[in-house]
Image (tube, grey):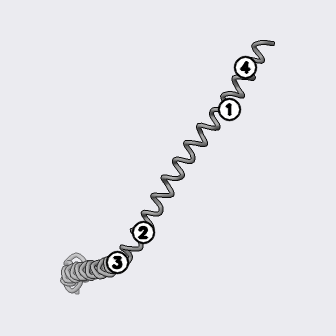
Amino acid sequence: MSQRDGFTGGFLTGTIVGGIVGGIIGAVVASRLDNNEEEQESSLFQSDKRERLDSEESIEMARNRLEDKIAQLNHAIDDVRQQLTPIEKHPLESESIPD
């Protein structure tokens, strides 16, 4: 019975001490996270106008890049079309029908 009492007492002591230590660690971590969120919110309010300008500039840059890519694709399509046009106008001799 003495081992059983020792186990129960140790278990209860470990539970209490673990709960206290866990509570302290949780409180410290929560307060640090709360401080970080407040700092991030204040920096977001300050940089909101700059972000709008950055986003407008980035949209314009993306639009210009897309226009350039479209122009490149159109040029490539025209090149292929020019390369294929002579083939279509002049069939191979083996394909021609003898008179």
Q: Quadrant of residue 56?
A: bottom left
Q: Residues within 10 Å of mark 2 (few under 14, many from 20)?
A: few
Residue at which label 1 appears: 15
- Whether residue 39 sits left or right of residue 60 in the image: it is right
Image quarter where the N terminus lies is: top right
Q: Do the residues labelled 2 and 1 touch (CB within 8 Å)?
A: no
Residue at which label 3 appears: 55
**Amino acid bearing label 3:** Ser
Q: Which of marks 4 and 1 is nearer the N terminus?
A: 4
- Distance CA(mark 1)–CA(mark 3): 53 Å
Q: Earlier in the sequence, mark 2 or mark 3?
A: 2
Q: Do the residues labelled 4 and 1 touch (CB within 8 Å)?
A: no
For the residue labelled by badge 4, is the local secondary structure a helix, a strand or a loop? helix
**Amino acid bearing label 4:** Phe
Q: Residues within 10 Å of mark 1 (few under 14, many from 20)?
A: few
Q: How crowded is mark 4: few (under 14 residues within 10 Å), some or many (20 or more)?
A: few
Q: Which of marks 1 and 3 is nearer the N terminus?
A: 1
Q: Which residue is drawn at 55% across and 42% down?
A: 25
Q: How many marks?
A: 4
- Distance CA(mark 2)–CA(mark 1): 40 Å
- Whether residue 77 sits left or right of residue 21 in the image: it is left
Q: In which quarter of the image is residue 85?
A: bottom left
Instruction: Kindly identify which numbered label has been placed on residue 7.
Output: 4
For the residue labelled by badge 1, is the local secondary structure a helix, a strand or a loop? helix
Q: Which of marks 2 and 3 is in front?
A: 2
Residue at which label 2 appears: 42
Q: Nearer the viewer, residue 53 or 7?
A: 7
Instruction: Kindly identify which numbered label has been placed on residue 43.
Output: none
